[in-house]
Image: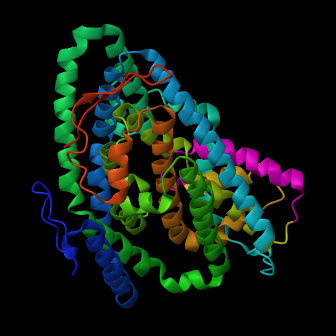
Amino acid sequence: MQITAPAHPDAPAPKPFYAHLYVQVIAAIVTGALIGHFFPQTGEALKPLGDGFIKLVKMIIAPVIFLTIVTGLAGMGTLRGVGSVVGKAFAYFFTFSTLALIVGLIVANVIQPGRGMNIDPASLDASTISTYTEKAHETSLTGFVMDIIPTTLVSAFVEGNILQVLFVAILFGIGMILVGDKAKPILNVFEAASFAMFRVVDILMKAAPIGAFGAFAFTIGKYGIGSVVNLAALVGTFYLTSALFIVVILGTVCMLNGFSIFRLISYLKAEILLVLGTSSSESALPSLMEKMEKAGCARPVVGLVVPTGYSFNLDGTNIYMTLAALFIAQATNTDLTLQQQVLLLLVAMLSSKGAAGVTGAGFITLAATLSVVPTVPVAGMALILGVDRFMSECRSVTNFIGNAVATVVVSRWQGALDREQFDAAMAGRPIGSAAPVTELTPAPAGLQLQERSVD
């Protein structure tokens, strides 16, 4: 006789399967794909649904980042903790962004997806990529650094530039630390606003299936699944490489830090499907920040690592750049020496940061990278323009998972991870009340954090 343990009296009643967000998003993606395939004109006409949802999410990204960072930093009570988190985050970003570039380089040389296409560069129509190459010329490291500084304090929020909002939030948070107790009234207001803002996030996420439905119907309707066939080797290689990077490299990092990459992916499955459906990792940024905090990562670490990672920890984009660059070289029978390939890799490390936050950033970054090695025809980008949309989905998902892993790892390094709450989240147990309002013990690096329940 099997004895079933009684349910905890405070445990919420289980939802029916169709009420789960990830089930709804899967259904929306499948339905959108079918409509886009069988009724392409209807699929293209559904584009406003996806665009509208992404605009709704972008509308709240700036206040979510600002409130999370300011309240998190103010709760530290010391500037030493800020420098410690930022230093560890950038050490992580640099290491794994470089690994992603190297992985793309190795796989492209081993599989050689472009070999045998024998494309004559003179036959390529460069006008189709002129918009991207023009933006690539406008993008520079100096311009990128200067663009971090907003024209006014308010313009950062008006323009929705993530790095500018991040810059203003860090300055304001540091100012509140220096002011001390006199800033407590403002901190209380910001904390209350933060709870309200995350409730807005919950409300907007109800529309996620609609956004995913419209975006995917448009993608299939406009580009068609058939457009992938001719470049299936490149698309397949990119998806395979990204999967290997997530499972092997990020999976090893997770294992060394005491958790499973598969459990983390399961915890974030609704957000990952949303990113896949909308081809935009920004669509799930507010939800990622909320769920990382619910999983036991301290608010200051979440506030600093997640938004910064969206510009500096682009694993999927880095894999794409080296893989696509070598694909174009192979397709046009352009032989590259090892020195030229290393040069491409070094330039990609910088240009991937310089094009952060720009629409079509992956393609613009690729144009900027190729222009450094004149032997590779930039016009060759026209070869992959038709399937770039399909690869952007994989880029976004890889970037998203990479930033989730980075948040957990940096939190653990900083001694700012509530392990009991995190394990409950990874095991799928209720976590809404897993972390009461407590003071964290100061981490070895001097980080003093106030942990708050996000429910």
| Left or right relative to 278: residue 11 | left
Name the residue at the front extreme.
1
Q: Position of residue 348 (x, y in %)?
A: 69, 48
Which of the pair 111/283 is nearer the observer? 111
In reply to whether residue 442 is colored magenta, the answer given is no
Display colour scheme: rainbow
Q: Position of residue 132 (x, y in %)?
A: 58, 56
In reply to whether residue 341 is colored magenta, the answer given is yes
Whether residue 398 can be seen here: yes
In the image, what residue occupies the spot 40% across and 87% down?
37
Which of the pair 357/95 is nearer the observer? 95
In the depicted structure, whether residue 283 falls above or below residue 62: below
| Left or right relative to 101: residue 24 | left
In the image, what residue occupies the spot 55% across and 82% down?
227
Q: Position of residue 324 (x, y in %)?
A: 68, 64
Whether residue 292 can be seen here: no
Name the residue at the bottom extreme.
38
In the depicted structure, whether residue 258 falls above or below residue 272: above
Which of the pair 447/377 is nearer the observer? 447
Q: Main secondary structure of the magenta part?
A: helix
Magenta range: 335-361
| Left or right relative to 142: residue 79 | left
Q: Quadrant of the C terminus?
A: top left
Q: Quadrant of the N terminus?
A: bottom left
In the depicted structure, whether residue 451 falls above or below residue 182: below
Which of the 4 quarters of the picture holds residue 127?
Answer: bottom right
